[in-house]
Image (cartoon, rainbow, N blue to C red):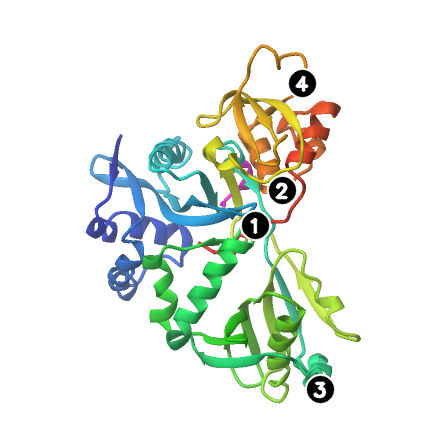
Amino acid sequence: MHIRRLAAEDRLTTSFPLQAYAFEASPMTAVRTDEFRAYLPYNAGNTTLVVEEDGVTTAAASAIPMRQNLRGAVLPMAGVAGVATHPLARRRGHVRTLMHRLLDGMRDEGHQLSALYPFRASFYERFGYVGLPRRRTAVFAPADLAPLLRAELPDELVWERIGAGYPRWRDYTDRCLRERHGFAVFPDFRAVGLRERDDRWLVSVVRGGETVGAVTYRIDDHAGTLIADDLLFDDAYARASLLQFFARHVDQVRRISVELVPGELPELWLTDVEVHTEARVHRPDSAAPMARLLSLEALADQPVGVGRVLVELVGDRWLAGRHLLDGTTGKLAVLPVDGAAEGRLPCARLTAAGLSALAYGVLDPVEVAVRGLGEVPVEAATELRRLFPRELPYLFADF
């Protein structure tokens, strides 16, 4: 078995066909094979590793150099994607070997976080990943938004093809990255695919010259569905402006489908709105995202509540040892454990997934223990809760 990092052109005959077999209709047509070359620019900065045996590519995995907001800090994040194995080489440990090598390299390059969409969540939990909320899909009739047509709102709407409006969209999502916990964006070489495909409309909400909301969408047919991507907005006025725009399609489409951030409640938008909201998580085609810390440096200087606790990190390749998490100054310090702290401060024993769950705000310390991701005594749970209060992350990027 030989592990090799691919050069750009190598992907055409190695990782791309293997990933297509794993995630697309198969066998591929000749036309599909020809389309691979068009994807090369959007993979230019990725790190792609493959396993080769007797000249045959038997497994592949890629990491996208992304950025993600962790409780207000924008940090380098490795987005793991395209994990695929030859059907005759499965269950032989190739993915485990590639994941170790891939994350070793990304961590060495300074990536402090990692995220992915798993084929099986329990598999990646063993690599220290923990589940994040999946975006919700809301479906409703545009007629139910009719009351908004009478609303006087303070904003201006800008409507354009995404190819023309891409700079505005990119600037706004970059601002969301700085302001929203869990939010992640692609690097420029990958993100520009949205502009170059130009297969979406963009409607932006502008107030005082600043974008305060935006959504991309397409319409599948007359009397069909307006299919909107993530509904992004700063406040209730901006959200109402976007929904008012949807309401104007009452004589054009039967229904509207829109992606929502976790925690958004469309049943409260208006009186008498009939809406179906779901977050479908199903293996293998509809996974909730997962994420993990790759380095304790990701926690340094995070704004936290006043708390002090010892943590022992176990069972992980990248996070290990005993550490003091000290928030007495209002900013988190990750310190070596000294003799004075031993026996005087509460101590929790955590897996990497357990610590990641606390850092991302998806689990309470008690839930970490119940899930088997650590041992958390009552006193330690109290301190960890002060340091890492619950906060719903929203990944945004889909890869």
Question: As drawn, which residue projects farthest toward the bottom?
Answer: 251
Q: Is residue 81 left or right of residue 238?
A: left
Give the amino acid type for the residue marked by disc 1 in the picture. Answer: His
* Residue 133 placement (x, y as % from top left): 61, 50
Question: Which of these two is toward me, 338 or 58?
Answer: 338
Q: Which residue is mark 4?
A: 345
Q: Which residue is mark 2?
A: 361
Which callout, 1 or 3, points at the residue further toward the start of the chain? Answer: 3
Few, some or many C-alpha atoms within 10 Å of disc 1 (few <14, some 14-19, many ≥20)? many
Give the amino acid type for the residue marked by disc 3 in the picture. Answer: Arg
Give the amino acid type for the residue marked by disc 4 in the picture. Answer: Leu
Q: Which mark is residue 181?
A: 1
* Residue 306 placement (x, y as % from top left): 67, 33
Nearer the observer, disc 4 or disc 1?
4
Nearer the observer, disc 4 or disc 2?
4
Secondary structure, mark 1, is loop
Give the amino acid type for the residue marked by disc 2 in the picture. Answer: Gly
Q: Residue visible at 27% across and 53% down?
A: 44
Q: CA distance from mark 4 to mark 2?
A: 23 Å
Q: Badges 2 and 3: C-beta atoms under 8 Å apart?
A: no
Secondary structure, mark 4, is loop
Dividing the image into 4 quarters, which one contains the C terminus? bottom left
Which callout, 4 or 2, points at the residue further toward the start of the chain? Answer: 4
For the record, the magenta segment spans 118-122
Q: Which mark is residue 150?
A: 3
Q: Residue visible at 51% across and 82% down?
A: 221
Vertical side of 163 occupied by 93: above or below: above
